[in-house]
Amino acid sequence: MRLHLAALLLAGSCLSIPTVAHEFTSGDLHILHPWSRALPPVAPTGAAYLVIENRGERSDRLTAAHTPIAAHAELHEHVHENDVMKMQEIDSVEIAAGGSVEFAPGGHHVMLFGLKEPLAAGGEYPLTLVFEHAGEVEVTVMVQGEGAADEGHPGHGHDHH
Ligand SMILES: [Cu+2]
């Protein structure tokens, strides 16, 4: 329920900030609108979301990510286990030829551990995505504030703490 509300608020804030729509291209891969939720400065973990489109004719895989603002980054997914939503690490995410994968709250995300600087609204930071075929692709993640602060990062059901 709260997730849906957050999604609506987020959609609204996207519309009101035109500069927020941004896209990165590497060969056949298009990475759309990388963003993070702004978090209180004390938050030790955060998450990055984006959409990866593969407009080519062979599949690729996202295998890792890293950023200078976090000690460690992992690819995560949300799973339902006994009616509890949990996050768990995944080795890689396939981006099928002609397909796309969405990293979004409540689903896949890039989890950031050991934040070295706060995710402050209006800020941005570099994130490097590592693909099996396309290699490393650096994108800029925009940090979005008001209306995007939900979903339970950091916190619920995390296995690492
Ligand atoms: Cu996570």
Image: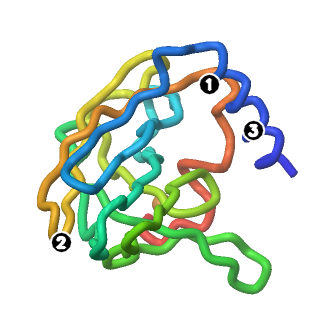
- Which residue position holds label 1? 14
Give residue 151's position: percent from left, percent from top.
67, 48
Q: Residue at x 87, y 51 (%)?
A: 1
Q: Residue at x 66, y 20 (%)?
A: 15
Number of other residues with Cα within 10 Å of mark 1, as a class: few under 14, some 14 to 19, many 20 or more: some
Q: Residue at x 62, y 76 (%)?
A: 79
Labels 1 and 3: the sequence-earlier one: 3
Asked if marks 1 and 3 touch (Cβ < 8 Å), the reply is no
37 to 28, vertically: above or below: above
Labels 1 and 2: the sequence-earlier one: 1
Name the mark on residue 132: 2
Name, please, the residue furthest toward the right: 1
What is the distance, in whole Å, between disc 1 and disc 3 at their CAs?
Answer: 12 Å
Q: Amino acid at mark 1?
A: Cys
Q: Toward which corner of the image does residue 82 lie, by quadrant? A: bottom right
- Which residue position holds label 3? 6
Q: Amino acid at mark 2?
A: Glu
Name the mark on residue 123: none
* SS assignment at label 3: helix
Left or right of 103 in this view: 59: left
Left or right of 115 in this view: 86: right
What is the distance, in whole Å, between disc 2 and disc 3 at their CAs?
Answer: 33 Å
Number of other residues with Cα within 10 Å of mark 3, as a class: few under 14, some 14 to 19, many 20 or more: some
Name, please, the residue furthest toward the left: 135
Q: Residue at x 75, y 38 (%)?
A: 6
Nearest the eye: 158 or 91: 91
Labels 2 and 3: the sequence-earlier one: 3
Give residue 17's position: percent from left, percent from top.
57, 14
State whether label 1 is within 8 Å of ligand 1.
Answer: no
Nearest the eye: 132 or 59: 59
Left or right of 142 in this view: 37: right
Number of other residues with Cα within 10 Å of mark 2, as a class: few under 14, some 14 to 19, many 20 or more: some
